[in-house]
Image (cartoon, rainbow, N blue to C red):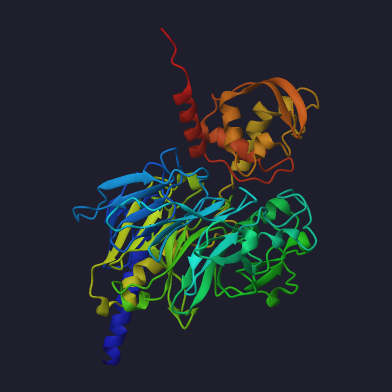
Amino acid sequence: MTSFKKQLIWLLAGLFVLFNLSFILNKDKQISITDNAGLVLPASFKATIVADSLIGGARHMAVNTNGDIYVKLRFPDTVGGNMALRDTNADGRADIITKFANYDDKGSYGTSMRVHKGYLYFSSETNVYRTKLNPQTLVPDGPLELILHDVNGRHEHDAKPLAFDNDGHMYVPFGAPSNACQEQNRVPGSPGLKGCPLLAEYGGIWQFDEARPGQQQKDGKRYATGLRSVVAMDWNTKENCLYVVAHGRDDLHMLFPKQYNAWQSAVLPAEEFLKVTEGSDAGWPYYYYDPLQHRKMLSPEYGGDGKKSGNGKNYNQPIMAFQAHWAPNDLLFYTGDQFPERYRNGAFIAFHGSTNRSPYPQGGYCVAFVPFKNGKPIGNWEIFADGFTGRKTVVSASEARYRPMGLAMGPDGSLYVSETEKGKIWKISYKGDRNKFTNTQLAAMEARKNLPNFKRPDPLRNNLMSGMLGSGARLYKTYCAGCHQPNGKGDGNLFPPLGGSEWVTGGPYMDKYRAINVMLKGLEGPIKVANKPYNSVMPKHDFLSDKQIAEVLTYIRNNFGNNSSLVTAEEVKKMRARILQQAPVKKQ
């Protein structure tokens, strides 16, 4: 090929990227998702919808050798915690959909669905089950075996993803019931527990017999430690080794505002892609990985300040670092032969998307791909599937139309993707000539990394709270300061303080919606704030616009000693609509 032809090819590829980047960045806030089953994929990949709006939502899934699909439901009921799907007329859509497995502990956070050696393995938050598959019967007709029981019960980060090696072992993480092993979990300034006693039973991966019923944690072997929360996990059969993409810790700014600002809390720490071998220690809770400084840093609970690296280099280092809080919730090494050769033995990762990067845009909400060679990534990660959110900027996770969760490979080498919000499942297939696939077909996907969902936020330009605090302060002085006082401390008698109030900042499971509800509906009668009783009337403020309520609550949640996420007008709008739906109809 002549030098001129090479230059021409590179010029055309560059123009292609610039065109797509300009197109992407200048689209309206809402992104059209009418084409390709709503997804944006590399050239020659096509997506079809296998199932839509599954009742109970969809978390993880597995595809059997005959094409039957098994799904772990997000919201189980008394009929069953799993869903079985079959396409009987070969039109690409499941036409038989039925629930099964009505076990007693179907908590929504239970995480795994795997087909292994003719058995269907799945988990709740506290148990791992298996049942024998029968290709002639969609719903497994074998007995339900309890393989593993977690005697410690449900708690924070209590997922049970599964992986299997080639020697009869099953690997199960035991997530830590803590953010960073503090003496008082998620309490600002609380130091870390010395020696972190949680690591004896939590924060690691245990190895078990894959076929022995009735096991408990004590029957397994601690295989690796220093892992706060693992949901994305898979055994790489080519390398014969375990890999995980671990969730990093949260709340650096909220817990240690003097050491970390809001921007640092949004971009730290990394979600770590790790190769895990027996005896590995990834460093939690003493260390986290800083993707900006490219090293493990000492946690503030143990004397860190964002500058000290301590002995971080002695711990298991990530083979790749992803942006903070993207929530890696499934990992799949591709072993099929339908996709082009560059995908073979590479890693697909489903990012459920962040919830706690406020006041900056949330990020993730995609399926990424990492090319592999000799057990290590080659080059950078890629966006493989996007378009799930339906918008360029996600302020709050509730705005995302879909949030990818589960990955599975079909018998023909297609990739299946499930999502949690609407219960949808896609099948992604390659329709081009796999021998003619080039990097040019990835150019448009690479350009998407400049969208807010993927680009690291600018500290000033991308601060979504800018402008809200000034308006919120004015609204507070007008409508709130008379009772709660200008300093937010209340009057010590009738009107409670706003600083440190669980009614304002909520907890890990209530967050901002309790405060929105009080603003719209008011509150009357005895309550407790910071364990002190109050009994007065808080009038409803539903006369304020959605934008005004969002501004004043954002101000309150970020003043008087509070460090919480912003409230959006859309969140207020949704709560207002919900309240109106619940209101009794007045008789004429």
Horizontal relation, residue 566 to residue 533: left or right: left
Q: Is residue 317 left or right of residue 312?
A: left
Q: Please state which of residues 72 and 476 is positioned toward the viewer in this rendering.
A: 72
Q: State left or right for residue 416 relative to residue 542.
A: left
Residue at position x 50%, y 56% in the image: 363
Q: Compared with residue 424, is residue 435 higher up or lower down, i.e. above or below?
A: below
Whole-percent x and y of residue 282?
A: 64, 70
In this view, the residue farthest toward the bottom is 2
* Residue 143, position as x, y percentages in the image: 42, 52
Residue 218 screen position, x and y as percent: 65, 61
Pick whichever, 11 or 437, lies toward us: 437
Residue 269 in sight = no
Q: Can residue 216 be seen in this view?
A: yes
For the C terminus, the image quarter is top left
Number of marks in picture:
0
Q: In which quarter of the image is the N terminus?
A: bottom left
